[in-house]
Image (spheres, coloured by chain):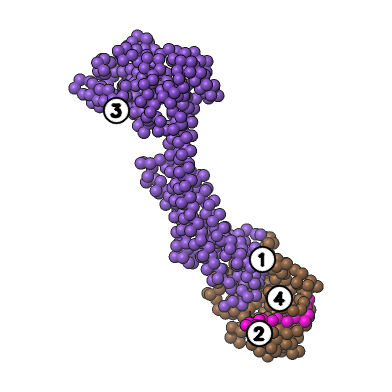
Chain colours: A brown, B purple
Amino acid sequence: MIKVSSISKIYTTDNIKFYALKDISLTIEKGEYVAVLGASGSGKSTLMHIMGLLDKPSIGAVYFEKNLTTKLSDNQLSEIRNKKIGFVFQQFNLINRLTVYENVALPYFYSGRKDSKIKQRILNLLEDLQIKEKENKYPNQLSGGQQQRVAIARALIMEPDYIFADEPTGNLDSKTGKEIISILESLNKKGKTLIVVTHDKSLADRAKRKIVLQDGRLLS
Amino acid sequence: MSEGYYILLVKTAVQSIFRAKLRSFLTALGIMIGVMSVVLLMAFGLGIKNYISDQFQELGSNILYVVVGKIDGNLAAGSRALASNFRFKLRDVASLRRLPEAEVVVPIYLQPRVKIQSGKNSFYGDLVLSDDGLYKAYNYQNFVGKFFDESDLRGREKVAYLGWNTAAELFDSPAEAVGKTVVVEGVRLRVIGVAKEKGGGSASDFDNNVVAPYTAFPQLDPENNFYFIYLRAVSETQLNSLKNRVIAVLSRNYDADDFSVIEPTEMLNAVLNIFSFVNIGLVGIGAISLVVGGVGVMNVMYMAVTERIKEIGIRRAIGAKKNDILLQFLVESIILSLFGAVIGLVLAYIVVLLIKPYFAAEIDLTIVGTAFGVSTAIGIFFGSAPARRAANLEPVSAIRYE
Ligand SMILES: Nc1ncnc2c1ncn2[C@@H]1O[C@H](COP(=O)(O)OP(=O)(O)O)[C@@H](O)[C@H]1O
Ligand SMILES: [Mg+2]
């Protein structure tokens, strides 16, 4: 469960306060499939970052599974992002000078864990996502759809409970986009909590719950 | 952390350095020059130190020199000592021989630049008159023949033992010298041996000597005119008490200004002290270039952090802790700095190889270790500010960075 309670995110430029998010409260239960909708600049990414513990609200409280996140240290937040949360971004955000395999292994390296089967797990994951033969390629040698599959593999390697996808199809053609969405939905069917940002209405309609943002406020 | 973590850490750092080849090379240049100068200075220091200790090692560590005149640790006073009119007598040697701590006592008479003649050939060298103990005291080694012995001394035999140059100048080949006659100060001496070449820059020119028993030259009265007495203690532990006893014995008859008792190892230390003082100054100059190199490393690391803000954000998003980011950039600055150190060491080593025939220089493990240690420290010291900046970036602003 991730819960935000009366949060606002305020940016101050030249002494002018700007509310990227204003007084938002919502709870996401484990296993849910949530679509976040809204125009560009409405605060979708900001909300995702706060719920994904990458960012902090200016006002209000964020709970991650009963923990008040302001009480957690930077190391503890990193650890939750590492083990409980997987991010998928619009621009894929792979590290270009690392191979596909290394990109997927990176969260494992940061986990401090030792898993003798890690190599096999990574290869299985790449296999499931149909990019096994790209194991030793670099991201810029792959198509957009393939890069997003690598990003999904990286998000899954630590077997997190929550997947945050911020416009995961935004840089893909519609056919590839549908493939990516169906991969994400299959993860939700296997029990993962899925939060997808999109401004594609037809995609959003597939989600069981919709959150609509407008100018930083929650519409529904 | 799994070992893959560290392998990737180093691999990533090396990759980043090689991606910006020119920039990395220019940065490493500062470290390279610094390491090279420090290593070279240390190499010269070590070379000179080893050279000096070899010289003294050859003489031994349980040795005392008794010389005429006053020498008080001031090296320049050496020339004053030679000018002194005071000389030791054979009975002084006899009383020193009675000391239980003294194993060997060898008196030496020296007449510098005498004419040594053999047939039409002549050569100007030093006439050394001594007893049979000189052979061991000076670590002579025979090229041909032998040194004179005790019976030659007692029998007042007119025999000569030639230094290498002396023999080479007077005869077609030093090997032919034995059995030939040389004339020195009007005395005809039969050559019984030639020493191997000593070489090097030793204070007394062993190679240009002609050595004879002091009993062979009564007209020069060497028995009342020794300028130098060589003593060897029974053991190193007895050296100090021998020194005190020698001073006590000689003080019974002479003024304190007439003679000096010197431990060669003390002289060695005095020389080394002067040298290490100079060396500290020179190493300081190298250190300045290392600091300049370090500032270069810092600049490049700040650039690297700025270039990789987005990457830092990605790493933070997938679970990297501040320390992971810190370590990543520290490893990179250490490797960058070590890269300079390796080139600097290789260049210094080449210089040492080239210069070795002419000048004492040596690189040992301590010097290599110092070079690596110092450059690692520079990498850490100058890399830590940029690395901390990277680690303290807000994850969200880093990942939003375009
Ligand atoms: N660091 C920042 N400083 C100032 N304004 C920001 C900053 N980050 C985001 N914003 C603003 O907050 C608003 C919401 O941004 P975002 O959450 O990215 O919107 P969305 O993802 O819905 O397009 C935008 O108007 C954006 O310009
Ligand atoms: Mg956005």
Seen at 34% across and 12% down, the residue is B215
Q: Are circles 3 and 4 on residues that touch, CB within 8 Å?
A: no
Q: Amino acid at mark 1?
A: Lys
The residue at the point 48 percent across, 54 percent down is B288
> Would you place residue B233 above or below residue A33 in this image?
above
The mark closer to the camera, 1 or 3, is 3
Give how far apart the Cα atoms at labels 2 and 3 are: 96 Å
- What residue occupies the far right of the structure in this picture? A66
- The secondary element bearing badge 1 is classed as loop
Disc 1 with disc 2 on a shared chain: no
Q: Earlier in the sequence, mark 2 or mark 4?
A: 2
| Distance between mark 3 and mark 4 Cα atoms | 89 Å
Residue under pointer 3: B165
Choose top left, top right, bottom left or bottom right for residue B326: bottom right
Q: Nearer the viewer, mark 2 or mark 4?
A: 2
Which residue position holds label 2? Answer: A16
What's the CA distance linking mark 1 and mark 3?
75 Å
Residue located beneath label 4 in the image:
A56
- The disc labelled 3 sits on which kind of residue? Asn
Callout 4: SS: loop
